[in-house]
Every structure is written in C-alpha cells, then in structure tokens.
Image (spheres, rainbow, N blue to C red):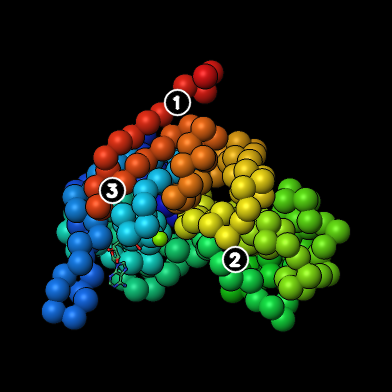
Amino acid sequence: MALDSKQSFASQSLIELRDVHKSYKLGETLVPALRGLSLSLDRGEFVAVIGASGSGKSTLLNIIGGIDAADAGEVTINGQSWKGLSDNRRSEWRNQFFGFVFQSFNLMPMLNVHENVELPLMIQKHVSKDERRRRVESLLADVGLSAFAKQRPDKLSGGQRQRVAIARALVTEPLVVIADEPTANLDSTTTLQVVKLMQDLNAKKNITFIFSTHDEKLMAQVKRILRIKDGTLIQESQKSQFE
Ligand code: ADP
Ligand code: MG
C-alpha cells in the first residue's frame, strides 16, 4: 500500500474530501455537522479552518484524522479511503500518520515534560530507547523547552504546555498534525507565538498542519484559510507567499 512508505507519494493530494456529510443524533433529531464538504490538501501545507462555534470545525478535523467516520462521501489519505480499513488498520494509521494537538493540552500530570513527549513512542516497539531520547531532546530544543525537560506540566504556563503538546504530536514523525483550537486557552501574544512555532515546524519538517480556530485575528498569519459555516465551506482563500 502506498502509505506504507512515507516517502512514496503519487501526484494526488495527500488528503481529499469529497462531498462529506456527517450528522449527530441528539435524542430524536439529527444534528447536521457537515453538509457536503469537499477539499483537498497537499503535503506540507499549513491550513487554518476558521468558523464560529458549532460550524463543524471539530467534526471536520476528526473525520480527516480518522477519529470519527463520515456518514456519506469519501475521505482519502494519499488515495486510500478511511472507509476501507479495519479497526486495527484505522488505529495504526492514526498513530503512524497523524499527530494530534488539543485545546486543553491533554498532558499527563504525573509525567515530566520529557516523558510526556516520549509517551506516543512507547507503543512503537521498533523505536529504540536511544532513538526515543534523541527525538525527544531534538523536539524539546525545537519548541524551546530543553531546560524544562524534568518539570511537571503544572509548573508550566499555558503556552509552554501547548508547546509540549506540539512536540508530543511530532515525536512519531507524522505526515499531518491536526490541532483543534490549539490556541483557544491562550492569550493573544501566546497565541501568535504558538502559531508561529507551528509555521516554523511546518517549514522545517515539511509536515502538513491543519488547525482550527475561531480567532479572526489569526487570518493575517496564515497562508491558506478554509472558512466554514453550518457544515459547508463558504470561502477558501490562499495568499501568495510573496504577499
Ligand atoms: P465546532 O468545532 O466548529 O464548534 P462541531 O464540529 O463541534 O463544531 O459541531 C458541529 C455541530 O455538530 C454542532 O451543531 C454541534 O452541536 C454538533 N455536534 C458535534 N458533536 C456532537 C455530538 N457528539 N453529539 C451531538 N451533536 C454534536
Ligand atoms: Mg470544536
């Protein structure tokens, strides 16, 4: 299968959604979350999904990352549909090809910073102890937290915690990092720092980043913006890199 090698990429887009629909049952009623959404993302893109609360951002990200399944339509990762995968393959794909960052950081309070970043590698048996240490130390340097390796998360600021979470998302060397409102709990200065950090890592490592936000102020920072409203894409803008 093409995705078994992270290097071998065909000319097709990395991620394709075609006419994706998703509803949630709430008692007797169906709440539509995505209503016929199509888009494609290439490798190495840095994309913001912007929309009001309830517009379908989390649903979209969860469907791209295989956390949730579409009711109708097609979601393919390098040409392979999520739909065709067994439960085991789905979780293998999630672990191997995606890194996730959450609004509330989701760090383990009893583990120090180094251990938190290392955690996703503990289930990857082919990664040796030395390689784990090398990757964690290198990522902590990338996110500017080498000096905090031995600290517990409760000693860190919100921005520092989110930088730990970003390092953790990258430690498995994913193709795509999905960050659902990663800056929602941060002040505006820290928000810009975290977005800048994600952009730097995107440029340095050619990892695709897709993050959601309802913060209009971030619009100016991001090259490609997908604006969604009521579960559909209402506007897509792509700035020239020379702007
Ligand atoms: P956003 O992330 O932009 O705030 P969501 O994707 O969370 O939007 O939600 C889109 C719509 O789907 C909203 O109307 C929301 O109430 C509904 N929804 C999302 N998750 C569930 C769920 N688990 N059960 C019922 N309704 C849900
Ligand atoms: Mg959400």
> In the image, what residue occupies the spot 41% across and 46% down?
49
- At label 3, the amino acid type is Lys
Q: How far is mark 1 from mark 2, CA to CA?
A: 30 Å
- At label 1, the amino acid type is Lys
Dot 3 beta carbon under 8 Å from ligand 1? no
Mark found first going from the N terminus, 1 or 3: 3
- Cβ atoms under marks 3 and 2 closer than 8 Å: no
Which residue is at the far left?
A: 28
Between 207 and 49, the residue placed more toward the observer is 49
Task: Provide the secondary structure element on which disc 1 rests.
Answer: loop
Task: Provide the secondary structure element on which disc 3 rests.
Answer: strand
- Cβ atoms under marks 1 and 2 closer than 8 Å: no
Ligand number 2: quarter of image: bottom left
Instruction: Name the residue tied to disc 2.
Output: 105
Instruction: Name the residue tied to disc 3.
Output: 229
Instruction: Name the residue tied to disc 1.
Output: 239
> In the image, what residue occupies the spot 23% across and 70% down?
24
Query: As displayed, is residue 114 above or below residue 159?
Result: below
The answer to whether 205 appears left or right of 112 in the picture is left
Mark found first going from the N terminus, 1 or 2: 2
Which residue is at the far right?
A: 147
> Residue 218 placed where, x, y %?
52, 40
- Residue 211 in view in this figure: yes
Between 221 and 44, the residue placed more toward the observer is 221
The answer to whether 147 appears left or right of 233 in the picture is right
Q: How far is mark 3 from mark 2, CA to CA?
A: 26 Å
> In the image, what residue occupies the spot 46% across and 42% down?
216
Mark 2 surroundings: few (<14), some (14-19) or many (≥20) residues within 10 A: many
- At label 2, the amino acid type is Phe
